[in-house]
Amino acid sequence: MGTLPSRTAEAVALTEAVTARNYSPLPVVVAEASGAWVTDVEGRRHLDCLAGYSALNFGHRHPALVAAACAQLERVTLTSRAFGNDRLGPFCRDLAALAGMDLVLPMNTGAEAVETAIKVARRWGYRVRGVPEGRARIVVAEGGFHGRTTTIVGFSTDPVARDGFGPFTPGFDVVPFGDADALRAALTPDTVAVLLEPVQGEAGVVVPPPGYLAEVRAACTEAGVLFLADEIQSGLGRTGATFACDLEGVTPDVYVLGKALGGGVLPVSAVVSRADVLRVVTPGSHGSTFGGNPLAAAVGSAVVRLLETGEYQARARELGVRLTERLQELVGSGVTAVRTRGLWAGVDVDPALMTGAVACRRLAARGVLTKDTHGCTIRLAPPLVVTPEELDWAVGQLAAVLTEAGGRRPRGQRAGSSPA
């Protein structure tokens, strides 16, 4: 992006001087945000097409979520679970109802929720399924992303996530994503659960073959093991349904939720399941200082109310069709493949033109923010409040970036001026 403007350069230099380099961010420093747009320290506006990896499904500073947070800030923010608070019960009741489940175990981050689900599955396996102590195994998928803890990266197939962090926790069997036969073959008497993302987000919005989730559900039911659906990125409206599993009429035994559950206001995550599963957790066996705090519960309740209307799921379905049509026009014009599910897309850029990282830098220069993954793939996941015109404009910017790099301009695509 050339020489950075002074305020951006100063902010980037300070951050790099005082923080560990566990990220390599685009040289854009956000100072304000509203809806689908952010404003950087130079006063330039950018359309946010990443939405905090789906944490911002409802946009930046959604009025209902900000109001819920502000009202709760005036009352009480933290009690710890050593005491009760008046927001936790209503939040868990309403989230359980939204998911069609009985109980909620509230946590904070997505990785924390996945770790919790793993612990629950293992204890359930020993106490309910009858697996001998210390032998529980969980089947997971290649290309999956469930967090950054040592247990989770231990079964990751991404060498960048694993390198230098062993030794790893045993007890996981990895199978190809989308291959139901391989999954069935991996199930043994010691298997307690299958842990999958219904759509693999970090892998590049990888959508499984039609019927795969139903096959997973059937295999788990036949084997008497739990199906854990990691809907941290795919859930809560992103795919055009409340949960991505809904799109195949599948109900897992456990939903693992996060990101959008906090509305982009603060970290909120949860494990949601039936009583016969979550009742294996007993006092002292699991906990969290901040999990279920009243501020998080207040915001989480407001998120559930937004989802109960069905408005955001419908927007994701409708705009997802539009996004798919616009992106498909780019195939053969600098794009080699497109995968979409609702308002969520993985776009593979022709490596002969540029890498995904270069494409994202050039998009940022044009006012569109997104992120690359695995070389030449970029992910598009704008907030569900984005307008059709804003969506068209963003795809137009991508078309312009490809054309400038030597790709053929697709028919009907124009870069246009910002609709902001």
Image (cartoon, helix red, strand yellow):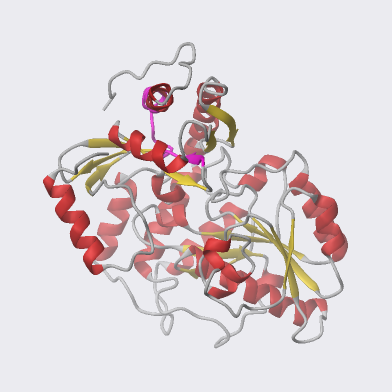
For the point 45% across and 35% down, the residue is: 354
The x, y position of residue 329, in whole percent, is: 54, 19
Residue at point 25%, 44% (across, down): 33
Residue 105 visible in rendering: no
Q: Residue at x 39, y 33 (%)?
A: 386
Q: Is residue 414 left or right of residue 209?
A: left
Determine which quarter of the picture holds residue 62: top left
User: Residue 37, position in %: x, y?
Assistant: 29, 38
In this view, the residue in front, 137 or 305, is 137
The stretch in magenta equals 376-394
Which quarter of the figure is the N terminus placed in? top left
Locate residue 27, reporting x and y percent: 27, 47
Residue 281 appears left or right of 110: right
Residue 2 visible, this angle: yes
Quarter-of-image position of residue 172? bottom right
Q: Is residue 38 above or below residue 16?
A: above
Q: Quadrant of the C terminus?
A: top left
Outermost residue on the left side: it is: 6
